[in-house]
């Protein structure tokens, strides 16, 4: 099991993640909204924004996105804890335990990128993203 930082930006994810790469080194990958299956549901203006980015260097993994929820970018929702699980049983157990007393924002489901994925807010108000790569 691993845990990574996941940062949410308000349209400047590419700029911020490029800055972090300049500071920390590593390999940086981006997926825009326009390059994803979500493209058809988004305005032309949104297609250039970042759906997901990953900066990796050895054991360092920093992820980011411009995908802000309905409430907008608020202090406290710009960082998530991303839990990459090693099995389907592990992700289901962790999801159930972490969401107990909190809010299951996005129940676990199969994603278009081939993973079991969901997110929740725990009873302390912390946002968690859970991921199990089935490939």
Image (cartoon, helix red, strand yellow):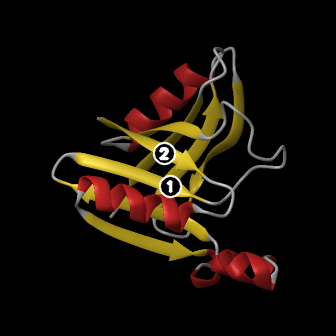
Q: Residue at x 63, y 60 (%)?
A: 66
In the displayed structure, 88 sits above or below 135; it is above
Residue 12 sits in which quadrant?
bottom right
Q: Secondary structure at mark 1?
A: strand
Q: What quarter of the picture does the C terminus occupy? A: bottom left
Badge 2 crowding class, 10 Å Cα cut-off, few under 14, some 14 to 19, many 20 or more, is: many
Q: Which residue lies under the disc numbered 2? A: 6
Q: Secondary structure at mark 2?
A: strand
Q: Residue at x 66, y 15 (%)?
A: 123
Q: Residue at x 43, y 53 (%)?
A: 63
Q: 2 or 97: which is nearer to us? A: 2
Q: Residue at x 76, y 49 (%)?
A: 69
**Residue 127: image tag:** none
Q: Residue 29, image x and y in percent?
A: 38, 71
Residue 47 sits in which quadrant?
bottom right
Q: Residue 88, image x and y in percent?
A: 40, 43
Q: 43 or 12: which is nearer to us? A: 12
In the displayed structure, 62 sits above or below 123; it is below
Left or right of 27 on screen, residue 45: right
Q: Which residue lies under the disc numbered 1? A: 64
Which mark is first along the chain, 1 or 2?
A: 2
Give the Cα separation between the discs numbered 2 and 1: 5 Å
Confirm or deny contact between disc 2 and disc 1 (CB under 8 A): yes
In the displayed structure, 116 sits above or below 4; it is below
In the displayed structure, 58 sits above or below 112; it is above
Left or right of 27 on screen, residue 109: right
Left or right of 79 on screen, residue 55: left
Q: What quarter of the picture does the N terminus occupy? A: top left
Q: 90 or 66: which is nearer to us? A: 66
Badge 1 crowding class, 10 Å Cα cut-off, few under 14, some 14 to 19, many 20 or more, is: many
């Amino acid at each position: 099991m691993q845990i990574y930082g996941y940062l949410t930006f308000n349209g400047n994810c590419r700029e911020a993640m490029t800055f972090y790469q300049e500071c920390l080194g590593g390999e940086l990958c981006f997926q825009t909204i326009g390059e994803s299956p979500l493209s058809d549901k988004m305005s032309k203006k949104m297609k250039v924004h970042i759906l997901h980015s990953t900066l990796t260097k050895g054991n360092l993994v920093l992820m980011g996105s411009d995908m802000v929820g309905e409430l907008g970018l608020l202090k406290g929702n710009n960082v998530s804890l991303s839990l990459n699980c090693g099995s389907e049983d592990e992700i289901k157990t962790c999801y159930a335990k972490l969401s107990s007393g909190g809010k299951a924002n996005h129940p676990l489901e199969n994603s278009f990128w081939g993973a079991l994925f969901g997110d929740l807010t725990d009873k302390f108000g912390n946002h968690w993203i859970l991921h199990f790569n089935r490939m």
